[in-house]
């Protein structure tokens, strides 16, 4: 049964496919409750895209979930350190760095990557980028 999530209780988001599909998603889901539902859907999209590119993603589910969340954090320029994300998942920051690099390279992630940074209707990435002191949107890799 698909999981349907809502943003602000009013606007339905796309269903998250056929629910949580693997161990990484089951580890990632509770952590996403604190980031907001919409960002959670974007994190799942990022993980699924990476999983589709990587033949067999290497690592424990906790490490892969932490690396996925850290990639989202880096793209959105949130002020969260890699060590904080690693600690939240009970894994080593060094291993998170390695798995993050694999995700970044496989998906060619960029700062404020439009595929994975908030895409709510009526929300413009340009507004957030300007609020963070960037203009135009930087095209640099992570």
Image (tube, rainbow, N blue to C red):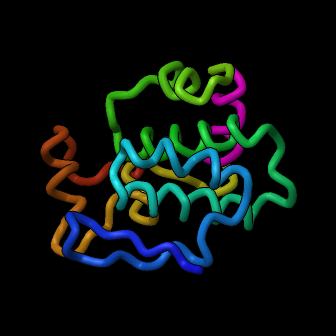
**Residue 66 placement: quadrant:** top right
Residue 80 visible to the viewer: yes
Tell me if 128 is positioned left or right of 18 in this view: left
Tell me if 16 is positioned left or right of 37 in this view: right
In front: 138, or 1? Answer: 1
Task: Give the image location of residue 98, x and y in percent.
Answer: 71, 31
Task: Give the image location of residue 106, x and y in percent.
Answer: 69, 54
**Residue 22 placement: quadrant:** bottom right
State the residue at coordinates (63%, 55%): 25
State the residue at coordinates (86%, 55%): 56
Q: Is 100 in the magenta?
A: yes
State the residue at coordinates (20%, 58%): 126
**Residue 96 placement: quadrant:** top right
Tell me if 125 is positioned left or right of 45 in this view: left
Q: How many marks?
A: 0
Image vertical order of residue 74 relative to residue 26, above or below: above
In front: 131, or 19? Answer: 19
Residue 141 visible to the viewer: no
State the residue at coordinates (44%, 56%): 40
In front: 58, or 62? Answer: 62
Image vertical order of residue 52 relative to residue 29, above or below: below
Image vertical order of residue 4 relative to residue 124, above or below: below
In front: 76, or 11? Answer: 11
Image vertical order of residue 93 relative to residue 99, above or below: above
Task: Give the image location of residue 119, x and y in percent.
Answer: 31, 67
Question: Which quarter of the rendering shows the N terminus?
Answer: bottom right
The span shown in magenta is 94-104
Q: Is 73 in the magenta?
A: no
Task: Give the image location of residue 94, x and y in percent.
Answer: 68, 20
């Amino acid at each position: 049964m698909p999981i349907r999530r809502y943003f602000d209780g009013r606007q339905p988001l796309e269903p998250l496919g056929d629910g949580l599909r693997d161990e990484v998603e089951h580890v990632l889901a509770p952590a996403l409750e604190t980031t907001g539902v919409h960002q959670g859907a974007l994190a799942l999209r990022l993980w699924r895209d990476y999983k589709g590119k990587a033949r067999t993603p290497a690592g424990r589910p906790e490490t892969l979930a932490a690396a996925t969340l850290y990639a989202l954090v880096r793209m959105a320029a949130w002020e969260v350190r890699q060590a904080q994300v690693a600690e939240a998942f009970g894994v080593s920051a060094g291993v998170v760095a390695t798995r993050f690099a694999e995700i970044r390279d496989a998906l060619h992630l960029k700062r404020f990557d439009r595929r994975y940074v908030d895409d709510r209707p009526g929300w413009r990435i340009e507004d957030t980028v300007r609020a963070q002191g960037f203009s135009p949107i930087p095209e640099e890799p992570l």
